[in-house]
Image (tube, helix red, strand yellow):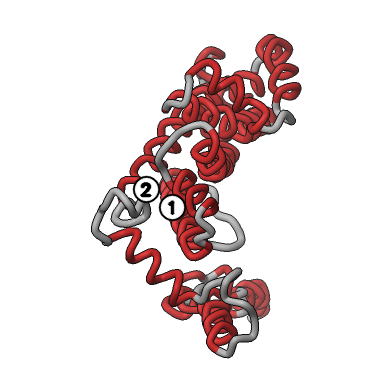
Amino acid sequence: MAHGDAITGEAAPAQSNRRRLPVRLRPGKLGWKRNLRRFLVPVALLVLWQASASLNLYDPTFLPAPSTVLEALWQWMFGQRTAFAWYSGTWFEYVYLSTSRVMIGFAIAAVIGVTLGILIGWNELVADLFDPVVQWLRPIPMTAWIPFATFIFGIREGAAISLIAMGAFYPIVVNCTTGAEQTPKNLVRAALMLGTSPRKILIRVVLPAALPFIFTGLRLGVGIGWVLVIVVEMLAVKGGIGYAMWTAYQFVRIDLIIAAMFTIGVLGLVTDRLLLLISRRLLRWNTGLRAR
């Protein structure tokens, strides 16, 4: 009986811990309620904004109501294209231009940034040669490179893509370097003891261990890409959401500016969610406290 009591005494705390497991550790229990609450704050802000505009609590010239912005967005998306209305029916074309620029620049930054970052974090010679250059150039604002980009490429796609790639490169390379540097030494030793050759350690051990940092860098990089595409389309190329935003500013169309801001926010959110979905599939072993 004493033996049974001992077993019961050891098992009870474990069962109690399972019963008291925090809700954030059981994402399946949240279900639709969690998805619903994610929209509570945005919807509440929109309702408050619309109500304030309807009650004339501020001058709508400087901040149009959400209904006015929605009308402008609809015209921008589905309006009839004419030579006298640049904003009518051009939304899909501008979204395509901006998205293609961001994706090409981000792909270039990802390939170079991940490769160089892993090598800097793993190899001392590569770190000594390239890390000082990266840290020296990283604080320089991307807007400072616009004159050089336009001088080299002209007001063309190359200028936009090069600036987006450069801006997205730095967070990617820094995070990948950190991930490679923090590879647990026990993993490397275990791989060597199991017969893995030193040349294959980088691919089989360091790269998988750095994946959480890699995806963090990629998410930061693609976010910066969406920021920079607005800047370069305002100053260095024609067409795109940034170009539309700048033109709307010149014609004092605040409703279209807000519509462009909403568009770029949605596009950035979609690309971030896609990267997060990919990371979840590849990093099933990396279970954290909270599932998003």
Name the residue rendered at 50%, 55% in the picture.
251
- The local secondary structure at tag 2 comes to helix
Q: What residue type is labelled 1?
A: Leu
- Camera sees residue 187: no
- Camera sees residue 173: yes
Mark number displayed over residue 138: none
Q: In the rendered image, which quarter is residue 201 located in?
A: top right
Left or right placement of residue 35 versus residue 133 in this view: left
Q: In the rendered image, which quarter is residue 135 located in?
A: top right
Q: Where is residue 145 in the image (x, y as percent from the top left)?
A: 63, 25
* Residue extending farthest left: 80
Q: Where is residue 268 in the image (x, y as percent from the top left)?
A: 48, 51
- The local secondary structure at tag 1 comes to helix
Left or right placement of residue 174 versus residue 33 in this view: right
In three-dimensional space, the C-alpha distance between marks 1 and 2, rounded to whole angstroms, equals 9 Å
Q: Is residue 101 above or below residue 53?
A: above
Q: Mark 1 points at which residue?
A: 267
User: Which residue is nearer to you in this view: 82 or 37?
Assistant: 82
Name the image quarter holding the N terminus: bottom right
Whether pointer 1 and pointer 2 mark residues with C-beta atoms closer than 8 Å, the reply is yes
Name the residue rendered at 62%, 77% in the picture.
59
User: Which residue is nearer to you in this view: 126 or 263?
Assistant: 263
Q: Position of residue 229 (x, y in %)?
A: 51, 40
* Residue extending farthest front: 84
Name the residue rendered at 60%, 69% in the picture.
62
Q: Is residue 203 above or below residue 75?
A: above
Q: Mark 2 points at which residue?
A: 95
Query: Does label 1 or label 2 sit earlier along the sequence?
Result: 2
Q: Where is residue 43 in the image (x, y as percent from the top left)?
A: 51, 78
Which numbered disc, 1 or 2, marks the residue closer to the eye? 2
